[in-house]
Amino acid sequence: MFRFAYPYIFLLILPAGAVFAAAFFLQRKKNRAMRVGSTRSFGTKHSIFYYKLLVPGLLFFAAAVLLIAALARPQIGNVNRDIRRKGIDIMLALDISGSMQLNDFKPNRLEASKEVAKNFVLDREQDRIGLVVFAGESFLQCPLTTDYDVVSNLIAAMEIAPQSLDGTAIGLAISNCINRLRDTESRSKVIILLTDGENNAGDIDPMTAASFAKEFGIRIYTIGMAGSGGVTQQGFFTQRIPPLNDRLLRAISDETDGRFYRADSDEQLKAVWDEISSLEKTEIDARQFMDWDERFFGYILAALIFFLAGYVLRNLIWRRSGC
């Protein structure tokens, strides 16, 4: 960006122009009465006299204009931005119970949830993300970190919990996430809990855990995967899938000023994660200021060149005595 710090200085061009015009006409009138060395100029519209006066005068005037421009302080501005990002602390709590093997999502519920969770993680900036998985028990897979590749790889490696640990311990998963978030200094703390069943394991009530989350200023987004449901086959055994408890998940989110989402298809599941991503944005504090660099030296140098050119033409090359 270019500017003149004192543009009103250019008003000096008016009196300077008037002075140079007056000096030119006075000098021209005076030279008409002087002896000339040739009669070739008579009868022509513009004699050599005219140009010997005009050209140096214009060069002197240009030098004066450039000096005035230098006084106006020409400057070039460089925009500088001070951007400070305030990240969010996010704990992901992902269900790995046996019911996540159902293939009403493609290729199954677990793989569908892993795919969207990985994309969510890799789209973050500056936020710290941790990972908890749960079935009948809850396990911390990764504490809060900004190493998104590590979190993404851990999500990709998730597998269905063994039969001995099957179940859905929602309250335990929330408590595990709270333990990782409660002492952080982040302004925004979030738990994203994804499950496809009803709380049926663990010794912590989900609503009790939600009330603790509220005390620590933690917001919980709950995602219920609710496809066609039915039964799942585990070896020679058939297991009936418990229905999704919409009321419980909604109550957990409402308690903590979060939101509940029900995902009935792969497309809807992706849309849910995209919406959460748009809601939980990194806070950006951006300040913009301008640094101005002075550029008057070039104008002064150009003025000096014009002045010297006019002086040389007038007093050395086009000497009046030779006119």
Image (tube, helix red, strand yellow):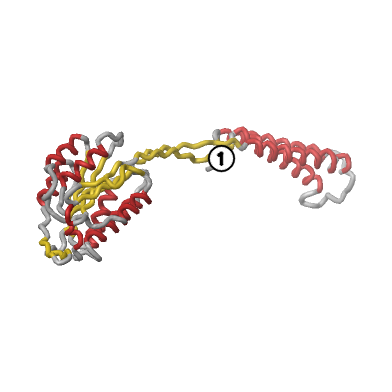
Could you say where residue 54 lies in the image, as x and y percent from the top left? 75, 43
Foreground residue, 54 or 263?
Answer: 263
- Name the secondary structure under disc 1: strand
Image position of 303 (left or right of 207): right
- Residue at 12% over, 52% down: 198
Q: Give the crowd class for mark 1: few <14, some 14-19, many >=20 residues within 10 Å.
A: some
Q: Residue at x 34, y 54 (%)?
A: 153
Residue 180 visible in the displayed image: yes
User: On the image, numbered disc 1 is attached to which residue?
Assistant: 76
Q: Nearer the viewer, residue 313 or 283?
A: 283
Q: Quadrant of the C terminus?
A: top right
Picture coordinates of residue 237, whole percent (x, y): 13, 64
Mark 1 residue type: Ile
Going 52% across and 43% down the picture, which residue do you hit?
Answer: 1
Q: Position of residue 61 (x, y in %)?
A: 69, 39
Count of numbered badges drawn on the protein: 1
